[in-house]
Image (cartoon, rainbow, N blue to C red):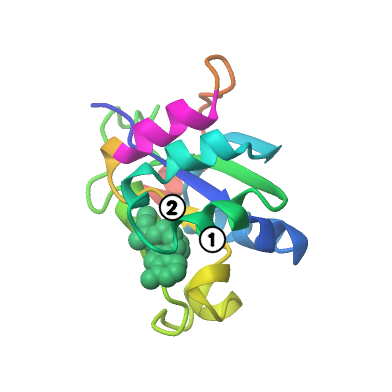
Amino acid sequence: EEVEQTYIMIKPDGVQRGLVGEIISRFERKGFKLTGLKLFQCPKELAEEHYKDLQSKPFFPKLIDYITSGPVVFCIFANLVNCIYFGKAWEGVGVVASARKLIGATNPLNAEPGTIRGDLAVQTGRNVVHGSDSPDNGKREIGLWFNEGELCAWAAALEPWLVE
Ligand code: DAT
Ligand code: MG
């Protein structure tokens, strides 16, 4: 069983507002495993490639300006799978869909309280965090933002307390 991973990016507003720890903490507390982490000033070409599906949208130039306006923190979270005790994948919602639930709706106005955007953001154009929308996009985005050798596979000792 392949490990499902999601690409999470704390956008420049999240970094400027000092929300890096808070946001990473929410994914950690949920029970995901951190397998990659970086702070980076995103070049325009990379931002355009990352959001290439949206390039025909009227807000695309503003979105690229926003994402490149300051450093971003990005990380990879994985399901607790390949469990050393049980040797099988976590059944249930995968990390990609589950992380999107924690993040909340694109427009913070529609994001439920308790979600990252619902609790910490007010506008679509400053919605503090990105999360992959499918396992395939997760793979694509991880490939875009991380180099080989920067990911860290490790056995989480807490696994048997999170996954039965
Ligand atoms: P999400 O970030 O929830 O996956 P998305 O992939 O549709 O949403 O869009 C990517 C980002 O683009 C989003 O986080 C903020 C911006 N965006 C989306 N729709 C927008 C709109 N109607 N006006 C302005 N910015 C928008
Ligand atoms: Mg998206």
Q: For ligand 1, which image quadrant applies? A: bottom left
Mark 2 sits near ligand 1, with its Cβ under 8 Å away: yes
Mark closest to the chain's N terminus, 1 or 2: 1
Location of the N terminus (image quadrant) = top left
Q: Is residue 43 magenta?
A: no
Residue 97: mark in rendering: none
Depth check, front residue: 109 or 18: 109
- Residue in the image at 36% along x and 39% along y: 138
Q: CA distance from mark 1 to mark 2?
A: 19 Å
Depth check, front residue: 111 or 71: 71
Q: Position of residue 155 (x, y in %)?
A: 51, 28
Residue 34 appears in the rendering: no
Q: Position of residue 33 (x, y in %)?
A: 50, 41
Q: Is residue 138 magenta?
A: yes
Depth check, front residue: 73 or 44: 44
Labels 1 & 2 near each other (Cβ < 8 A): no
Mark 1 sits near ligand 1, with its Cβ under 8 Å away: yes
Q: Is residue 128 above or below residue 136?
A: below
Farthest residue to the top: give it.
149
Residue 62: mark in rendering: 1
Q: Amino acid at mark 1?
A: Lys
Q: Is residue 33 above or below residue 146?
A: below
* SS at badge 2: strand
Residue 140 appears in the rendering: yes
Question: Left of 63 or right of it: where is 43?
Answer: right
The residue indicated by pointer 2 is 131
Residue bounds of the magenta highlight: 137-146
